[in-house]
Amino acid sequence: TDLPRYTPIVLVEDLISAHKVAQVSPALCLFGTHIHDVALNVLIKENRPVILWLDKDQYGLLPPKVNRLQSFLKHPVKWVSTDKDPKN
């Protein structure tokens, strides 16, 4: 699908969450909380806004992950923290 460049890619921890989120926005499964080189390369290539949505138990990891990701992508990265897991 040819989506506008301003449509964000949502990064989530697991495949089920990625499938659910992908119904409304592009999504990329991290298979955990680490942003691997493969995922980073996809994000650089796509050059889209990024939203990082980790489970609530990972809330403390969000600021350093967002800062690191922004330094690689050279544009702002937003984050989401919700009581509900995206797969639910």
Image: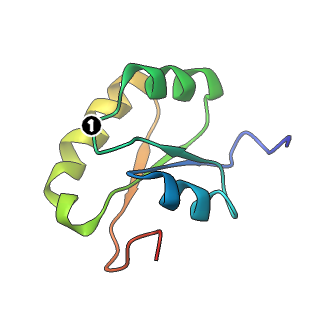
Coloration mode: rainbow
Q: Mark 1, residues whose alpha carbon is within 10 Å: few (<14), some, or many (≥20)?
A: few
For the residue pair 18 and 5, the one nearer the viewer reads as: 18
The answer to whether 37 is drawn above or below residue 29 in the figure is above
Q: How far across and down, in percent of the image, does residue 28 sit?
A: 53, 43
Location of residue 73 by image quarter: top left
Farthest residue to the right: give it: 2
- Horizontal side of 57 relative to 4 (left or right) equals left
For the residue pair 11 and 13, the one nearer the viewer reads as: 13
Farthest residue to the left: give it: 60
- Horizontal side of 20 relative to 61 (left or right) equals right
* Residue at screen point 39% across, 20% down: 37
The answer to whether 37 is drawn above or below residue 15 in the figure is above
The answer to whether 87 is drawn above or below residue 52 in the figure is below
- Residue occupied by mark 1: 67
Farthest residue to the front: give it: 16
Location of residue 79 by image quarter: bottom left
Q: How far across and down, in percent of the image, does residue 13 sit?
A: 38, 51
Q: How far across and down, in percent of the image, does residue 48 sit?
A: 61, 37
- Horizontal side of 60 relative to 16 (left or right) equals left
Image quarter hosting the N terminus: top right
* Residue at screen point 73% across, 39% down: 5
Q: Amino acid at mark 1?
A: Asn
* Residue at screen point 18% across, 65% down: 57
The answer to whether 18 is drawn above or below residue 20 in the figure is above
- Horizontal side of 16 relative to 60 (left or right) equals right
Q: SS of the residue at dot 1?
A: helix
Q: How far across and down, in percent of the image, does residue 62 sit?
A: 24, 51
The image shows a total of numbered marks equal to 1
For the residue pair 50 and 14, the one nearer the viewer reads as: 14
